[in-house]
Image (spheres, rainbow, N blue to C red):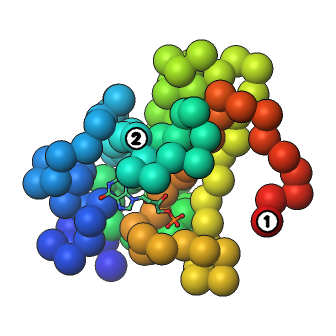
Amino acid sequence: MSEPSEDCVFCTIAAGGIPADVLASSEHSVAFRDLDPQAPTHVLVIPRRHVANLGELADHPAELADAVVLARLVATQEGLEDGYRLVANTGARAQQSVFHAHLHVLGGRDLTWPPG
Ligand code: DGP
């Protein structure tokens, strides 16, 4: 599905219907701070298009690239030159909880590997 969904919290944020700490936006994407930060910098980058996950966004390569470019811009703005992580939880078993594609931009502390 690609139409905005009024049942989708990220569609509502992208439309300005729920307040969010928006850091940057572009033609196809919006970046805002996560409600439940897991690192000193924890920003979500979402496509304006409603698709369930990043894999589906790959059917729209310009919009996928736009999201990654916005994530890179946010990382620079947040001073994460020493390293940051882009995470896209995909599917329930990977702990995806909001089924609108998003990239987590995590940084500002040492990040361990492997992830849990
Ligand atoms: P995931 O588990 O990968 O689907 O991540 C969803 C993230 O979305 C989670 O870290 C919390 C965040 N989140 C959920 N609802 C809201 C909201 O209304 N506002 C903001 N800023 N973040 C939200």
Image height check: is 2 above or below 70?
Answer: below
Label 2 close to label 1 by CB (< 8 Å): no
Q: Which mark is residue 33?
A: 2
Quadrant holding the C terminus? bottom right
Q: Report whether 29 appears left or right of 42.
A: left
Where is residue 8 shown, x and y percent of the image? 26, 71
Is the N terminus in the top left, top right, bottom left or bottom right quadrant?
bottom left
The picture places residue 18, in percent across and down from the top left corner, at 16, 53
Please tell me which residue is depicted at 40% across the width and 41% down the height of the picture.
33
| Residue 83: % across, % down | 75, 28
- The residue sitting at the right extreme is 114
Query: From where the camera sits, is residue 68 visible?
Result: no
Residue 53 visible in the current orientation: yes
Ligand 1 lies under 8 Å from the Cβ of mark 1: no
Q: State ligand 1's quadrant.
A: bottom left
For label 2, being within 8 Å of ligand 1 is answered yes
Residue 49: name its quadrant. bottom left
- Between the residue at mark 2 and the residue at mark 1, the CA separation in whole angstroms equals 22 Å
Which residue in the structure is indicated by mark 1? Answer: 116
Amino acid type at circle 2 is Arg
Mark 2 neighbour density, 10 Å: few (under 14) some (14–19) many (20 or more): some
Question: Under tag 2, what secondary structure?
Answer: strand
Name which quarter of the figure residue 82 lies in: top right
Q: Relative to the observer, which residue lies in front, 30 or 37? A: 37
Q: Position of residue 32 (x, y in %)?
A: 36, 40
The tag earlier along the polypeptide, 2 or 1, is 2
